[in-house]
Structures are given as structure tokens and as C-alpha cells.
Amino acid sequence: MPTVTAEITSGLAVAITNGSHTWRADEPIDLGGADSGPNPYELLLGAVASCTCITVAMYARRKEIRLDAVEVSYEHDRVHADDCVDCEGDTDAAGRLDRIRGRVRIVGDMTDAQRERLGDIATRCPVHRSLERRIAFEDEVIVSVG
């Protein structure tokens, strides 16, 4: 997999590249940014949404299932663990955890069995599965002068 790099360009705006493509992230104005791009959580949700669409489309193509549309939306929020019956994972000091809620709409002429299988496939994209599991970060931070 290619390396993704990011660099502050001005204010809180960040240029992100994988060597072939460049995109931008920023914070909204009320958080001190210029709102010149999606914020980091929106990029994360976009990664899950795009991966879900691609995974469903690739499976349908491989199984020769006709798709007319795949539409995906995700939302991120932080909830108190006590208020979230189905949530598992690490909580912060205030007892909250991250929650991502999604909605996948798949349209096409298919059998009930194909419809059920595509529903299952929609929750199995690689990015979705990575986020469901605990991710181990190995960061090297270098702080230098000038």
C-alpha cells in the first residue's frame, strides 16, 4: 500500500497525498480553520463510505448481480457507553466512546438471497472491518528545532 503523507499548508489546512493524488483537510471556521476541505472525521467517514460502495459493487460484478445504485451515508458521534447497548470498545475519561452509524441503500433487480448476501457484504468492507477491531498504532514522533 502506498504511504499517505500530510502537511500543514496554512492555518489548519492540510495537504494530503499518496503520491498520485492530492486532497485537502481543514477544520470549520468555528474551530479555527478556514473550512477549505472536509475535517478529519469526515475524511474517515468518506473512507468507510467509499470502501462500502466499492466492496458491494465488486461483489455484485463478480456474482453478475445487476446494481442500479449503491448509496451509503455514515455519521460519527461520541456517546456515553451506558447509553449505547450495542456499543463495545474503549471509553474516554468521561465514559464516552466513538460510534459510527451507517445507512446503506442497494438498488437492483436481484433475488431475495442475493439481496440478503449484499446486505451482509455491505458491512464487510476492509475499512469497516479495520475500524471494528482495535488498531495498533506504531508512531515515531520527531520534534526538532527550526
Image: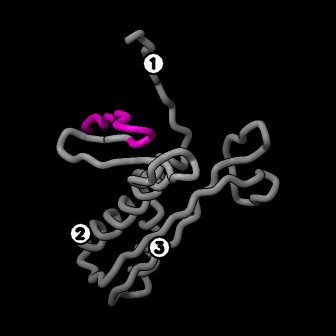
Is 28 left, or right, of 18 in this rendering?
Answer: right
User: Which residue has dot 2 on it?
Assistant: 62
Instruction: Please tell me how crowded label 2 is: few (under 14), some (14-19), or many (20+) other residues with Cα within 10 Å.
Output: few
Q: Badge 3 local density, few (<14 within 10 Å), some, or many (20+)? A: some
Is label 2 in contact with label 3 (beta carbons under 8 Å)? no
| Of the pair 3 and 53, the residue shown nearer to us | 3
Q: Amino acid at mark 2?
A: Arg
Residue at mark 1: 141
Residue 97 is situated, as x and y percent measured from the top left of the image, at 69, 47
Q: List the residue tagged with mark 3.
A: 104
Foreground pick, 34 / 131: 34
Residue 20 left/right relative to 46: left
Answer left or right for 29 relative to 84.
left
- Give SS at disc 2: helix
Amino acid type for the residue under numbered disc 1: Val
Name the residue located 36 percent from the left edge and 61 percent from the top edge.
50
Q: Of label 1 and label 3, which has the lower sequence position? A: 3
Quarter occupied by the C terminus: top left
**Label 3 element class:** strand
Dot 1 lies on which element?
loop
Q: Which residues are magenta?
A: 1-13
Amino acid type at mark 3:
Val
Residue plotted at (40% across, 79% down): 106
Measured Cα–Cα span from mark 2 to mark 3: 20 Å
Colouring convention used in this rendered image of the protein: one colour
Front-most of residues 1 and 93: 93
2 vs 3, front mark: 3
Instruction: Give the quarter of the figure containing the N terminus.
Output: top left
| Residue reaching furthest to the right | 82
Whichever of callouts 2 and 3 sits on the residue coming sooner in the sequence is: 2
Q: Which percent across, then down, holds residue 101? A: 58, 64
The vertical placement of 57 against 130, above or below, is: below
